[in-house]
Amino acid sequence: MRKLLYVAAGSAAYAAANLMTEHLNFPGLEVGNWSLGNGLVGVVAGLAPLVVSRVRRQWLTILAAAAVGAVAMVLGAGVAAMTDVFVANLTPDTAISAEWIPLVTWNLIWGLPLLVIVLSIWPVVRRRVAR
């Protein structure tokens, strides 16, 4: 039951973040195929528990999750941008400068700090819910 509650809370937080940022528009990012990149981000980030499964210190877990998350963001955005070379007939230079770099920059500036914040407060939330 608790795991279902965690999934629901995470889904609600993700939906709220999407709703708050849906009005933001970046040049070049309106072209499709971004679901593939987001899926890759999820797959790579989902491997983080395997990387830190034996780590018992919270700050090491947070550091490992941030590193894996950053790699996932760079790879996911890169795959999506490079796919637009074929799908949207962009040149590689345009895909990199107008799509990959702005998206990676945005995700690293906002995503990594939010990840660190969530992972820092997670043990407190978990203890309160367990009561």
Image (spheres, helix red, strand yellow):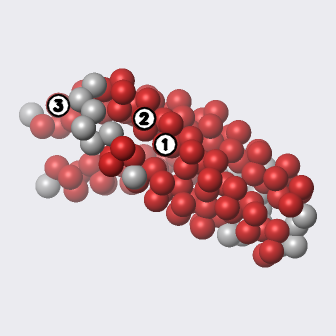
Question: Marks 3 and 1, Cα distance to the nearest angstrom?
Answer: 26 Å
Q: Earlier in the sequence, mark 3 or mark 1?
A: 1
Q: Amino acid at mark 2?
A: Ala
Badge 2 crowding class, 10 Å Cα cut-off, few under 14, some 14 to 19, many 20 or more, is some
Q: Quadrant of the C terminus?
A: top left
Residue tagged 1: 68
- The amino acid on which the numbered mark 3 sits, given as a three-letter code, is Arg
Q: Residues within 10 Å of mark 3 (few under 14, many from 20)?
A: few
- Contact, mark 2 vs mark 1 (Cβ under 8 Å): yes
For residue 77, above or below residue 128: below
Query: Label for residue 127?
Result: 3
Foreground: disc 2 or disc 3: 2
Mark 3 touches mark 1? (CB < 8 Å): no
Residue 120 visible in the shown view: no
| Residue occupying the far bottom of the picture | 87
Disc 1 crowd rating (10 Å Cα; few below 14, some 14-19, many 20+) is some
Occupied quadrant, residue 20:
top right
User: SS class of the residue under badge 3?
Assistant: helix
Which is more toward the observer, 25 or 70?
Answer: 70
Calculate the distance from the C-alpha at mark 2 to the C-alpha at mark 3: 22 Å
Do the numbered discs 2 and 3 sit on residues whose CB atoms are within 8 Å?
Answer: no
Q: Nearer the viewer, residue 48 or 110?
A: 48
Q: Residues under labels 2 and 1: Cα distance?
A: 6 Å
Q: Nearer the viewer, mark 3 or mark 1?
A: 1
Amino acid residing under circle 1: Val
Image spot of residue 114 (x, y percent): 50, 34
Q: Residue at x 86, y 61 (%)?
A: 92
Residue at far left of view: 131
Q: In the rendered structure, find residue 64 and report the number of the disc placed on it.
A: 2
Q: From what the image shows, is residue 94 above or below residue 68?
A: below
